[in-house]
């Protein structure tokens, strides 16, 4: 057996089906770093999602408040217009709310 044959057979036997332990520490360290970064990214995403949800909830509450405010303002405007039309048509203000309701046709605004 020559020197080149013995070297070839050693290399062939060492990589062929044998368990290799070289680089295990590096693989473990890489896995720890990878999973650590993955956990960090997931936790950051969850935190951002929570903040976005809080902002959305606050915006929705504000929008609902604004809508209620506009609805109230429009109702008050309608009531004022009814009183003004009554006053112009009857040369005076209504004596009671019931009189205004009957005059306006029983609409739900007054």
Image (tube, grey):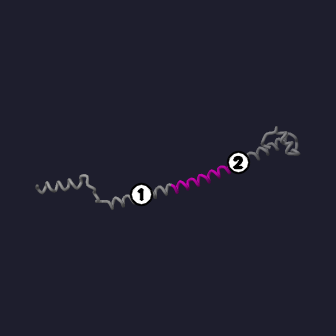
Q: Relative to residue 39, is residue 63 drawn left or right?
A: right
Q: Quadrant of the C terminus?
A: top right
Across and down, in percent, residue 47 comes to 52, 57
Are discs 1 and 2 less than 8 Å apart at CB?
no
| Magenta region, residue range | 46-68
Q: Position of residue 2 (x, y in %)?
A: 11, 55
Secondary structure of residue under mark 1: helix
In this picture, is 87 found above or below 3? above
5 and 57: which is toward the camera? 5
> How many residues crowd around disc 1 within 10 Å: few (fewer than 14), some, or many (20 or more)?
few
Q: Is residue 41 magenta?
A: no
Residue 37 pos. (x, y %):
43, 58
Q: CA distance from mark 1 to mark 2?
A: 52 Å
Q: Name the side, left or right, on which 96 lies relative to 74.
A: right
In this figure, which residue is indicated by the disc labeled 2? 70
Residue denoted by label 1:
35
- Check the picture and name the quadrant holding the N terminus: bottom left
Q: Which residue is drawn at the image coordinates 78% and 41% (left, top)? A: 108
Note whether 34 is above or below 71 in the view shown. below
């Amino acid at each position: 057996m020559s020197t080149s044959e013995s070297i070839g057979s050693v290399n062939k036997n060492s990589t062929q089906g044998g368990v290799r332990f070289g680089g295990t520490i590096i693989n473990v360290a890489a896995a720890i770093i990878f999973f650590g970064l993955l956990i960090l990214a997931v936790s950051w995403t969850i935190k951002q999602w929570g903040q976005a949800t809080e902002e959305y909830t606050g915006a929705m509450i504000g929008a609902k408040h604004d809508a209620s405010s506009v609805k109230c303002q429009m109702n008050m405007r309608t009531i004022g217009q009814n009183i003004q039309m009554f006053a112009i048509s009857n040369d005076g203000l209504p004596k009671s709310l019931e009189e205004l309701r009957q005059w306006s046709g029983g609409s739900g605004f007054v």
